[in-house]
Amino acid sequence: MHELPVTEGILRIAIEHAEKAGARRITDIHLVIGDLAGFVDDSIQFYFDILTPGTLAEGAKLHFHRVATRLRCWECGHEFHPPERDWTCPACGAMGGEVRAGKEFYVESIEIE
Amino acid sequence: MTRRQIPVVERILSANDRIAANNRERLRGHGITTVNIMSSPGAGKTTLLLATIRALGEACKIGVIEGDVASQVDADKIAQAGVPVVQINTGGGCHLEASMVQQALNALPLEEIQLLFIENVGNLICPAGFDLGQDYNVALLSVPEGHDKPYKYPSMFEFVDLVLVTKTDVLPYMDFDLAEFRRLVHGLNPRAPVLPLSARTGEGMEAWLEWLEAAVRR
């Protein structure tokens, strides 16, 4: 459900920038999505295929660039990619850290003709 | 036709963020403190709000925006407590968005409200991604849900200002490990207090009310 308004957002941004550049059509859309952002690639693709016919983005290819979660240890500053169910720092054993990467959710670029 | 790459770098939720910023400005203009309440369905959001309205009484003028997929059930309960309330039905949507709150604000007597609660749609995932214009985010987790939830829903527990553990009156019958839950929440979010309470028995309510009073004064 969640991915429908999100996909509308992607489409709005892509078409806005394509129109500004005088594009005939959008061929590719590059998205950056952090693992913590909570969005499912297949679901975005599903809504994209429903929403795009008749728009500049019809037939465009979606590229998902995934960003893995990265924590910065509160105690020692070591940065690490935590496995799914363990947030302990591999360097000092402290619990958790500041989220430095993984919440990204933006349109990075589009390719147009 | 030549193919060109155009850099964009625009947050996908930027349209929502703009409306949320307008809501925030409007609410602060009225001197209203706004608290976004989030949890799974059935964690006790409405029960907590009713107990909070009873406890604060005349001390603080409260307003409520109720978010649900369907029905008016929660808004009716809040209205019976004598507090201005607006029900938003998302019609299948799994979270509130800033534009829905914008509409709801038009239907509330803002000049009569000091503290506005937005009860989000019951969901531990989606509401965390959508700014509404609130000052504070509060997550509830009820004891029967289990203490491992921060591992499963990290984005919710990572960004909130306060975590309430609700239904503590059933702790003796459950394997809920409060110390472990606290450790997991603080793993990603060391600044958020974790307050256990039971809206049913009243145990732990004072700490929540104190937090609210400090939030309204700020």
Image (cartoon, coloured by chain):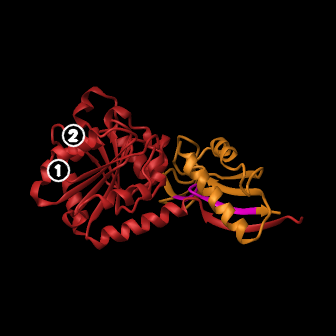
Chain colours: A orange, B red
Which of discs 2 and 1 lies nearer the camera? The answer is: 1
- Residue B56 % position (x, y): 14, 54
The kind of residue tagged 1 is Ile
Q: Could one spot residue B80 in this view of the protein?
A: yes
Q: Amino acid at mark 2?
A: Ser
Which of pointers 2 and 1 lies earlier in the amino acid sequence?
A: 1
Extreme residue toward the front, this view: A54
Which one is in front, A1 or B145? A1
Q: Is residue B149 left or right of residue A86?
A: left
Tell me, yes or no, if residue B191 can be seen here: no
Question: Dot 1 corresponds to which residue?
Answer: B53
Instruction: Tell me which residue sits at (59%, 57%) in the image.
Output: A9
Q: Name the element at disc 1.
A: helix
- Residue furthest out toward the left: B58
Image height of B66 relative to B24, above or below: above
Region rendered in magenta: A99-110
Which residue is label 2 attached to? Answer: B198
| Snapshot quadrant of residue B23 | bottom left
Are there few (<14), some (14-19), or many (20+) residues within 10 Å of tag 2?
A: many
Q: Quadrant of residue B209?
A: bottom left
Element type where label 2 sits in the image: loop
Is the magenta region chiefly helix, strand or loop? strand
Q: Residue at x 31, y 57 (%)?
A: B35
**Cβ–Cβ below 8 Å for labels 2 and 1?**
no
Tell whether position B144 is magenta. no
